[in-house]
Image (tube, rainbow, N blue to C red):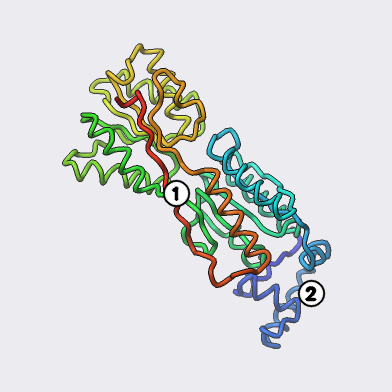
Amino acid sequence: MKPANLKTLALELNLSISTVSKALRDSYEISQETKKKVTDLAKELNYQPNPFASGLRKKSSKTIAVIIPEIANNFFTLAMDGIQVIAQEMGYHVLTYLTQETLSNEIASINHLRSGRVDGVLMSICSETSNNSHLEMLNDIGIPVVFFDRVCENLPFPKVTTDDYESAFKATQHLIDANCKRIAFFGGSRHLSIMNKRRNGYLNALEKNNIEADPNLMLDFNDNNEENLQIIGSLLSGKNPPDGIFSAIEKLAINTYEICYQLDINIPNEVKIISFSNLRTASFLGPPLTTITQPAFEIGHEAAAILFRLIEKKQMNDIPDKVVLKSTLIARKSTL
């Protein structure tokens, strides 16, 4: 039998984790009746508080955690640079956790942080995250959290993002203005609000231009590179292939270049390509890739600045619920 924890007590008593935690700490905010119920059950289930965590929460660790799905992505590399600048200015260390797009790794990272090892968390969720209970726990135990890029819209944490819907609309419109009639959308997990916003921007641009959306051109990809290459190859070698591709994910655009090379498909004469991308070598591809470039460094920098205001409890009334920074469409030869 697993040892009881705060979540176990909360579920048994139909209370929030925050209420249980305060009751065990004899907080004045909790009634004597509730305190008795909590302490009685804690004794019955042999609940043992974590003295290490309790001790650390009373003083600063001078460390923040950054939880991201991957580091190979150029966006996250630049965002980390922005975070690191602020952390160094504040005299803080940065712990980086890579979830590798899996929910189990994300939960394990959160559980590790519950021990009180950090003063705050910056986070971009993985593609499998659909349940928020493990994230709510950070709020319940009082660890400040700021989301960036990939966010949970329904959690009360500050969020720093880019204008995903507007940028996707502009990207699709750019292909339409380049005379594309059959425009494919390459997306990812529908659990991610960022992906749904990009998909909606694509669909609304088609609608505005009286182009009927074709479900066969709207593809959702996973993290299996070989499978992704096969799907793209089948699409481009099949009957009535697209003449334009809007990729919401950078690596899918690179996969498309690879398939076009294998199939001897000319970019941009036979198919035009635009992608969300912070790839530093986008202008050196053959042909150079048209991109929606996110302000990745600025997003990381802003998210870190907000987190340190939360940690130090400064200007709390002015902390925004959401900050949206603009991305930039950079037209290159892949769409010209």
Query: What crowding class fits label 1: few (fewer than 14 Cα within 10 Å), some (14-19), or many (20 or more)?
Result: many
Viewed as shown, does residue 150 lie left or right of 234? right
Residue 326 point in image, percent of width and height:
42, 48
- Amino acid on which the number 2 mark rests in the picture: Lys
Res 55 → quadrant:
bottom right
Which residue bears the numbered disc 2?
A: 43
Q: Residue 5 or 229: which is nearer the viewer?
A: 229
Classify mark 1: helix, strand or loop: strand
Q: Is 275 located above or below residue 207 in the figure?
A: above
> On residue 162, which mark appears?
1
Query: Is the N terminus in the top left, top right, bottom left or bottom right quadrant?
Result: bottom right
Q: Is 266 located above or below residue 336 in the figure?
A: above
Q: CA distance from mark 1 to mark 2?
A: 49 Å
Residue 94 point in image, percent of width and height:
71, 48
Viewed as shown, does residue 115 lie left or right of 72? right
User: Residue at image x 44%, y 23%?
Assistant: 229
User: Residue at image x 57%, y 60%?
Assistant: 133
- Amino acid on which the number 1 mark rests in the picture: Thr
> On residue 110, which mark appears?
none
Residue 313 point in image, percent of width and height:
65, 69
Q: Earlier in the sequence, mark 1 or mark 2?
A: 2
Q: Is 21 located above or below residue 233 in the figure?
A: below
**Mark 1 or 2, which is nearer the eye?**
1
Residue 51 point in image, percent of width and height:
83, 65
